[in-house]
Image: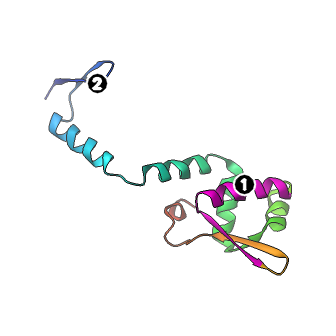
Amino acid sequence: MKYTVKTKNEECSASILSKKEIDSIKKELNQIQDFERRNQYFKILSDPTRHKILILLHRHMRLCVCDLANILEISSSAVSQHLRRLKDIDLVSSKRQGQTIFYSLKDAYSCPLTKLL
């Protein structure tokens, strides 16, 4: 079925989906409530160092800043900055044990990123 769909700035000749199907998909997209959170996850994963930190925490359950810095061969302050970004969107939690702070994935089993790691 060929028809023309008008968007804000242009017209598009569509030949696969009907107007009803397009409207249904738009409605479905608008019902995604955690869209912004998902978008933040993708932004976080776009940085290779943060992605590596998440993989390490997923595989090794908990690590301290010094261990992460040694493994990644970057400064502990750089690791701390990355961990802060991960904590800001509730992906990582910390727990103090004496003078050392250990980091782990927050709720690792329900985190949607776990499937990607």
Single out the residue that lies furthest toward the left. 1
Q: Which residues are magenta?
A: 76-96
In front of the other: 72 or 6: 6
Q: At label 2, which amino acid type do we have?
A: Thr
In this rendering, would 53 be left or right of 71? left
| Displayed quadrant of residue 69 | bottom right
Query: Dot 1 lies on which element?
Result: helix
| Displayed quadrant of residue 77 | bottom right
Query: How far is disc 2 from disc 1 in space, using C-alphas?
Result: 40 Å
Whether residue 30 appears in magenta in the rendering, the answer is no
For disc 2, the neighbor class at 10 Å (few under 14, some 14 to 19, many from 20) is few
* Residue 48 x, y percent position in the rendering: 68, 49
Query: From what the image shows, is residue 106 above or below residue 50?
Result: below
Query: From what the image shows, is residue 112 above or below residue 20?
Result: below
Prevalent SS, magenta region:
helix
Whether residue 95 appears in magenta in the rendering, the answer is yes
* Residue 32 x, y percent position in the rendering: 35, 52
In this rendering, would 105 be left or right of 33? right
Query: Dot 2 lies on which element?
Result: loop
The N terminus appears in which quarter of the rendering? top left
Q: Specify the label residue 82 is tagged with.
A: 1
In this rendering, would 10 be left or right of 46? left
Q: Specify the label residue 103 is tagged with.
A: none
* Residue 4 x, y percent position in the rendering: 19, 22
Q: Specify the label residue 7 is tagged with.
A: 2
Q: What's the residue at 72%, 52% (across, down)?
A: 49
